[in-house]
Every structure is written in structure tokens, then in C-alpha cells.
Image: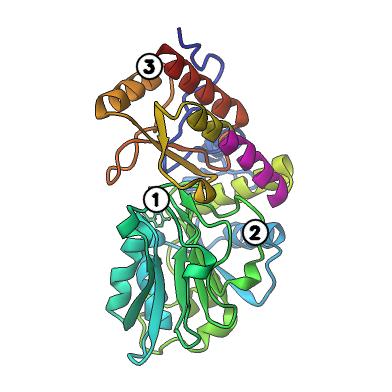
Amino acid sequence: MIKGPGRLDANALNFSGGPGVLPARVLEELEEAIRSAPGVGLSILGVSHRSDWFAELVDQTERDLRALLRLPESHAVLFLQGGASLQFSLVPMHLLRSKEQTAEYLRTGYWSAKSISPAHLEGQVRVLWDGEGGGFHRLPRPHELKPAADAAYLHYVSNETVEGLQFHWIPGRDDVIRVCDMSSDFLAYPFDPTRFDLIYAHAQKNLGPAGVTLVLIRRALLERAPADLPAILDYRAHLQARSIYNTPPVFAIYAVSRVLRWLIEEIGDLDRMCERNRRKAERLYSVIDRYPELYRGWAAPEDRSLMNVVFRLATPEREAEFLRQATQAGFSGLQGHRALGGIRASIYNAMTLVAVEQLAEFMEEFAAKG
Ligand SMILES: Cc1ncc(COP(=O)(O)O)c(C=O)c1O
């Protein structure tokens, strides 16, 4: 008999690929803020984005983010809308408007593949590495990449959410603009943000609910952006307006601020966050490796993601049975992405070790039953 989640509630056992799990403490704070935001006395859903309170919230959120990442003033922080998908267009619109230049892309999975077509509308594109021939089971090794010194920029996705492939090194050249979609592993581990010229990450994995996307951009890049961009699509307009160009998603930004406070006050820093994420991922991958006849990990072991543990079972029927029993035991969100099928356990920052332990035990018991 599967032990079942017992003391954990449904939110704690939400292994969804995104929008993902949020810390229990943040959910409580949001519940309270929907009734009455601290310091305002009104529901957060009715707080004016033109209020001093909201301007201070944006500033404080930026300060917390800078502190966590040790992000210097060389980089601006923007809170934008349109999801990571809008960034697939805004990046080439800002950085690839000259037809003589070529942008380089790493095509390592579902989301990086999606990021490429909008770039074709702006200029020339070279796919520097394409994982499709290998079925997107692995990432390139450093010696397989020959990035050009004269590329407009190099774009890659640090964590392929669908396939569960994560870069554990930084590709590209330090003398070429490096752009990274960190939507599904932002703030999961420490890294040097100054090696990146532009980072974007939507909130709905590690930061909060959908609705806000963070963009960290080296200020010097903004000087070269074309002059004819519509203001709503121009990073400079958002920077000048301190991310309050038009009505921003006040609630989503408030949630991000609470998640950052949780990370700082309860976890500590990105080293500790990473340590916790490693323990969670190792626990699940160790079950996969112990039962190779039942569970087949998708990613090459060197490229395994700390955020999305993707695996298949021998047949679609076994996968359906796994999901049926998992649902019965209280787990949710384990179905693989529609493009890939199989199983995906997303264990974003807010997923607890206790919840992962319960999933690991469930997987062990499922395997033991044969
Ligand atoms: C790595 C990555 N990039 C981009 C996207 C697209 O994000 P959005 O739906 O915010 O446009 C996703 C969606 O899950 C993702 O995981």
C-alpha cells in the first residue's frame, strides 16, 4: 500500500512544470494581501500602480534581487509583461536589427527551438548547435561549440523545462553578447550575472505567479537599440518609467517580492538554495537509476536538470498507471509536457524536501510492486 502524502496539502505536492509550487508562507501572505495589503489597508488587487507604496515595492524587490545575485549597477532590472515568449521577439528586435549581423542560437530543446523563429524576422540566424538529431537527450559539450567572435549575440536556454536538460556551465564567449532565457532555473543556484548581457526569466517557476517577467540587461546595450521601436516594446521606455510604463501586474510583482523575502529570510542565499535543490534532484534521480528496467531518465546524466526530472516508463500504459496511482496518492502536475509525454517532476525552488521524499517513496513502492 502506498503511504500517501498524509500531512502535506495539495499545494505542497504540486509538481507542475509551471505555474509551479509557491512557498506555503508566501501563499499565506498572498491570502492576507488579497484581503488587505500590509501598509495599505486595501486589497492588493485594488492598489494603484501609481501609488508611492507600489513604487517602493518595485524598488525593494529590485534591491532584494540585486542582493541575492550580487548584481551591480552595470545592469538594469525590468519587470515586464508578455511572458518569456515576448522576450523571444524583444531580444532580436533590440540586438539584431542590422541585416549584416548574425545571431547565434543553441537549439537544445522545445523552448530554445521556439525562441529562434522570431529572430529570423529581424536578421540572420545561425544555429550553432542543434540537439534535434539526438532527440534532445543531451546538451553540447564545450568543445562542440565554435561561437563566432563577430556574432550579434549568442542566445541559449539555461534549463530546458520540457526535456529536463540543464547547462551546468556557461556557453559562449565573454567578448560576445550573451543572452540567456533562465525562466525555469532563475535563482536556483549562484552564478556570476556579470557574465551575461541579458537575462530574462518569467515568474511562474521560481519567482511567483504568471504575469511578470524579469529582464536583467547590461545598460550599455540599450545605447545601441534601434530608435524606431514602439515604446511598449522598448526596454528603454520601461527603464525610464521604472517598470511602471503602463499598468503593471501589481499582484504578481507583490508575489515576487514575497518569494524573494522567503528566499532571503528562510533559505538564506543562493548557495543554500542550490544545496537544497541538489538534494531534491539527487533523491529522485537515485530512484530512477536504481530501477532502470522501470524508469528511463530522459536527460544524459551530465545534463540532468535540478528543476525538472523527466523520465519515461516502458510503455504508455505503465505511464498512465503511474499517473493514476500518483494522483490517487495526492500528487499533481506529474504528466510530462504535451510535446514529449512521459513523466516530469518539477521541483522548483519552493518544492520542499519532504514533498520530494514522499514522491521518491511513491516511486520506490510503485517499482517494488512490479
Ligand atoms: C525555458 C522557457 N522559456 C520560455 C517559456 C515560455 O514562457 P511564457 O509562457 O511565459 O511565454 C517557457 C514556458 O514554460 C519556458 O519553460
Nearer-N-terminus badge (2/1): 2
Q: Which residue is mark 3?
A: 328
In the figure, residue 103 lies in which quadrant? bottom left
Q: What is the quadrant of the C terminus in the image?
A: top left
**Badges 1 and 3: C-beta atoms under 8 Å apart?**
no
Which three-letter amino acid code belongs to the residue tagged 3? Gln
Q: Which residues are magenta?
A: 270-282
Residue 127: x, y in percent?
Answer: 36, 73
Foreground: disc 3 or disc 2 = 3
In the figure, residue 88 lies in which quadrant? bottom left
- The circle on residue 61 is none
Q: Which residue is mark 1?
A: 137
**Residue visible at 60% across and 50% down in the picture:** 188
In three-dimensional space, the C-alpha distance between marks 2 and 1, rounded to whole angstroms, equals 33 Å
In which of the image's four quarters is ligand 1 placed? Answer: bottom left
Q: Which residue is mark 2?
A: 65
Q: Residues within 10 Å of mark 3 (few under 14, many from 20)?
A: few
**Residue visible at 36% across and 90% down in the picture:** 98
Foreground: disc 1 or disc 3 = 1
